Amino acid sequence: MTDRPVASRRPAALGLLLAAAIAACSGVDEPGELGLAPQESGEPAATSRLAQIRVVVQPPGEFGGDEPALEVAAVFAQYRGYDEAAARTRLDLPRPPAERLRSGHCAPSDQLLVGDEPVSKDTVSKDSSGARELILLDAGNLSVGLGDAAIDVPLALVPDLVPTISGVTYTYLGDSLPAGAWPPGEPAPSELVVRVDGEGDELPGFTLRPRLPEPAALTGAVDRDRDELRLEWRPDGREPLVLRLVSLIGGEPVGEELTCVAHDDGKFVADLDELHALGLDDSPGTALRVSATRAGRTVFDAGEFVGAEAVVEVRTVTVLGD
């Protein structure tokens, strides 16, 4: 992937797991493919575990377009016969943009949705193919508390298309925040509460209180005289800021969406010609939708799941006229 100095949308987890399953049907899982964990013939494959809870919040009053105001996705997976990179690809858990792009650089968003983790080139013997599996566990009830609101996150079955991938995923998409989650005129919530009931000793119940990043308060302008995009926001400085840019005609996206990574220092300037070369539409009459996402990551242990992560993102959106 080539990035340039200077970001469609991320589908729900279930949809991307379906895409991974279809890819597996087309030969991804054949013995000898990249991403298969090496093992000696006759030895049982070791079981590994991977879990992530991801929450995306858009404050009230923001331009929403077709983006959900609240998104929750969670997976608790155990796998064998794959290396971690291959398991992450099948679970739609790619590295975040801030780990794949240098600050001040942009790339088409679609390129960043594809897993690019380095994977093993070792092959496995044919008699080990039956030992490969990826199971998404039922962790019991999962709820997310935001402000005075509590959201129960429903379960969905993974489509039974590939015998090596099975189980359930947690997915919630809300067009608006629940009542009491973020009352207008009130201070922004400072944390979430995530409760998981758990299922047995392997994955007992737990409660997390991850920090809710502060909204970026994004503003900006398109200066066509200087061929520049200038963005400003309230700096935080803890982690890189992820920007997503897409042109609009009549409120509908056109052209490529770009993802950019910026230092969270309160300003970002990009050359319009560079952005257009990456696929940002520059047709007459277009507006530009810009979102700024701050993310926080909490690492936790729960039973046999060691090094699991909770990722909380707050997205601020603005639309810049032609």
Image (cartoon, helix red, strand yellow):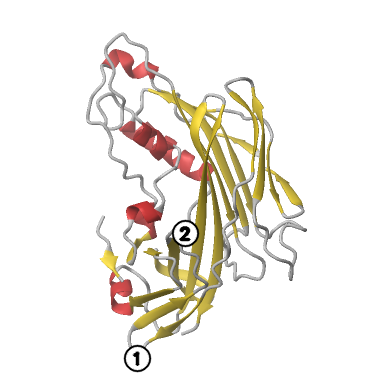
**Residue 188 in the image: x percent, y percent?**
67, 63
Q: Is residue 175 left or right of residue 29?
A: right
- The amino acid pointed to by label 2 is Arg
Task: Name the mark nearer the viewer: 1 or 2.
Answer: 2
Element type at mark 1: loop
- The amino acid pointed to by label 1 is Asp
Residue 139 visible in image: yes
**Residue at x 65% of width, y 28% of height:** 198
Mark 1 packing: few (<14 Cα in 10 Å), some, or many (20+)?
Answer: few
**Residue 283 in the image: x percent, y percent?**
38, 80
Q: Which mark is residue 225?
A: 1
Q: Where is 16 relative to 214, above or below?
A: above
Q: Is residue 220 left or right of residue 139?
A: left
Residue 159 visible in image: no
Q: Which mark is residue 238?
A: 2
Q: Which mark is residue 240?
A: none
Q: Is residue 76 left or right of residue 45?
A: right
Q: How many numbered discs?
A: 2
**Residue at x 42% of width, y 83% of height:** 222
The furthest residue to the top: 42
Residue 42 quadrant: top left
Q: Earlier in the sequence, mark 1 or mark 2?
A: 1
